[in-house]
């Protein structure tokens, strides 16, 4: 079965370890992952981070799908969107309120940024969990205000918000849930029952999580082979395709 990883990273990790696009592609290939979507979260300059991702896209055009890392409070946020989604043709946008230090329920710039993204038809990824800055609930409101945008909640809410995230997004059709870092069996089984294969997407959070664990844990959730195809690659294909 094909596997596409919708959520991985480049750049120096928070513990100071270096990595590269070549190392990423080589490591994921070892486990059968054929395509990967990446953002860069290291350092303080989104301009530098996004160029790192673009370089990886150019180096591995058939494998790497790039995401623009955007700080909505940055004065050049809209210019960065136009560069990354227009000129660079990236396939998504990543928000990480914890990394950029803003409360998303008190950041009026987000609406304008989402409106700018919407014209490019790409999906939006949001880090949900691990910090008071990363609760899912304000983003659920943004998803309702922007129904034509597709939102992917990475980590399915992590340990802190896993159960409540699944409960809250169950009936919101433009929100998908990504699987990495969600290792609570009850939450994964709840998502399998209540969200279903069409809105659950496989990711590894490379290099932070063990790739083999992230792949294998999905085998224990009672999905059929056809449903696993949705999760492992078909939903990624859908999110990576610009919505006109």
Image (cartoon, rainbow, N blue to C red):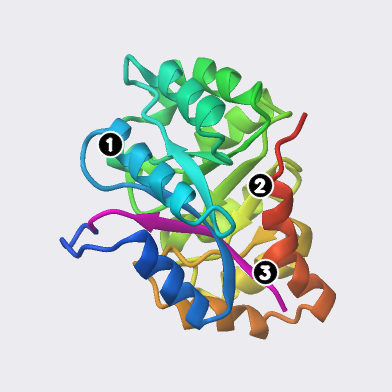
Residue at which label 3 appears: 232
Task: Tell me the number on the disc at residue 240.
Answer: 2
Task: Tell me the number on the disc at residue 48.
Answer: 1
Position of residue 90 relative to residue 5, above or below, is above
* Mark before the other along the chain sequence, 3 or 2: 3
* Mark before the other along the chain sequence, 1 or 3: 1
- Place of residue 221 in the rendered image (x, y in percent of width and height, measured from the top left): 68, 80
Cα separation, mark 1 vs mark 3, equals: 30 Å
Quadrant location of residue 14? Answer: bottom left
Residue at 75% in and 61% down:
234
Q: How crowded is mark 1: few (under 14 residues within 10 Å), some or many (20 or more)?
A: few
Give the magenta-colored segment's residue range: 1-12
- Place of residue 26 in the rendered image (x, y in percent of width and height, measured from the top left): 43, 74
Q: Does the magenta stretch include residue 17?
A: no
- Place of residue 12 in the rendered image (x, y in percent of width and height, measured from the top left): 23, 56
Q: How crowded is mark 2: few (under 14 residues within 10 Å), some or many (20 or more)?
A: many
Residue at far front of view: 59
> Would you say residue 204 is visible in this rendering?
yes
- Local secondary structure at mark 3: helix
Cα separation, mark 3 vs mark 2, equals: 13 Å
* Mark before the other along the chain sequence, 2 or 1: 1
Task: Tell me the number on the disc at residue 152.
Answer: none
Give the quadrant of the N terminus: bottom right
- Place of residue 190 in the rendered image (x, y in percent of width and height, measured from the top left): 67, 68
Quadrant location of residue 146? Answer: top right
- Local secondary structure at mark 2: helix
In the image, taking residue 9 as reference, residue 143 lies left or right, namely: right
């Amino acid at each position: 079965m094909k596997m596409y990883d919708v959520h991985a990273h480049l750049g120096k990790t928070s513990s100071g370890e270096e990595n590269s696009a070549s190392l990423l592609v080589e490591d994921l290939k070892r486990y059968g992952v054929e395509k990967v979507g990446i953002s860069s979260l290291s350092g303080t300059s989104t301009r530098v981070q996004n160029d790192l991702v673009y370089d990886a896209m150019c180096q591995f055009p058939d494998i790497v799908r790039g995401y623009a890392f955007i700080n909505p409070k940055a004065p050049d946020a809209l210019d960065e969107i136009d560069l990354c989604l227009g000129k660079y043709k990236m396939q998504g946008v990543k928000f990480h309120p914890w990394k950029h230090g803003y409360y998303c329920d008190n950041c009026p710039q987000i609406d304008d940024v989402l409106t700018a993204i919407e014209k490019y038809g790409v999906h939006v990824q949001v880090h949900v969990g691990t910090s008071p800055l990363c609760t899912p609930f304000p983003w659920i409101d943004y998803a309702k205000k922007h129904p034509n945008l597709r939102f992917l909640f990475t980590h399915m809410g992590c340990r802190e918000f896993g159960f409540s995230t699944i409960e809250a997004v169950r009936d919101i059709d433009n929100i998908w849930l990504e699987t990495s870092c969600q290792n609570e069996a009850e939450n994964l089984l709840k998502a399998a029952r209540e969200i279903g294969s069409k809105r659950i997407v496989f990711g590894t959070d490379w290099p932070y999580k063990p790739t083999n664990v992230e792949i294998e844990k999905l085998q224990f959730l009672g999905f059929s082979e056809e449903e696993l195809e949705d999760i492992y690659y078909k939903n990624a294909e859908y999110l990576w395709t610009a919505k006109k």
